[in-house]
Image (cartoon, rainbow, N blue to C red):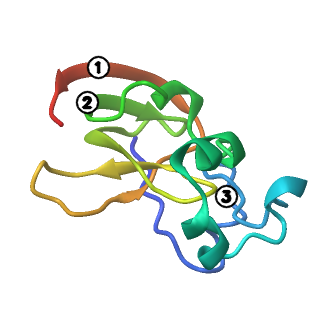
Amino acid sequence: MSTTIHLTADNFNGSPDFFNLRDPLPERLRDMTQDRWNLLSNAQREAMRDNSHLSPQLIGLEGWRVEAVDVHGERRRFIVGKSTGWRPCHLEIKTARSACGDPARARYQSVRRLEKIR
């Protein structure tokens, strides 16, 4: 049996499948603004970035097409992407022609690497 979760403003932050967007930022990022972030060097950005919303099972698989089974048993294939900014998240990108994707789950039952795409 497969379960499809449709994201809405009401269930996105309450679902255990996803990271909570209301999680407090680390102290070093509490007063961060886009203008301040833009003034930082790449090295400074890397040192300050909060990677807590990256899916541990997808780290290192950015640019790979994978087959994943989520915690509900739903199997799907996607290209692993990664958002930008001071708290990035992994993205489930449907095709190589897609410009963006949905946020990845916080955890999966399994992830299998298929092919390098990007």
The label shown at residue 113 is 1
Name the mark nearer the viewer: 3 or 1: 1
Q: CA distance from mark 3 to mark 1?
A: 26 Å
Q: CA distance from mark 2 to mark 3?
A: 26 Å
Closer to the camera in the image, 97 or 77? 97
Residue 11 image point, x, y percent: 64, 71
Q: Find numbered disc 2 in the image and state the secondary structure of the residue it sits on.
A: strand
Q: Mark 1–mark 2 contact, CB under 8 Å?
A: yes
Q: Find numbered disc 1 in the image and state the secondary structure of the residue it sits on.
A: strand
| Sooner in the amino-acid sequence: mark 3 or mark 1 | 3
Q: Is 56 left or right of 24, judged from the image as shown?
A: left
Q: CA distance from mark 1 to mark 2?
A: 7 Å
Residue 44 image point, x, y percent: 64, 47
The label shown at residue 41 is none
- Asked if residue 26 can be seen in this view, the reply is no
Closer to the camera in the image, 111 or 28? 28
Q: Is 108 left or right of 114, judged from the image as shown?
A: right
Crowd around label 1: few <14 · some 14–19 · many ≥20 (10 Å): some
Q: Disc 3 designates what residue?
A: 15
Crowd around label 3: few <14 · some 14–19 · many ≥20 (10 Å): some
| Sooner in the amino-acid sequence: mark 1 or mark 2 | 2
Image point (60%, 75%), residue name: 34
Q: Is residue 51 above or below residue 10?
A: above
Q: Is residue 39 above or below residue 41?
A: below
Q: Amino acid at mark 2?
A: Trp
Q: Is 61 left or right of 52, judged from the image as shown?
A: left
Name the mark nearer the viewer: 2 or 3: 2
Image quarter in which the N terminus is found: top left
Q: Amino acid at mark 3?
A: Ser
Image quarter in which the C terminus is found: top left
Q: Disc 2 designates what residue?
A: 64
Image point (47%, 48%), residue name: 104
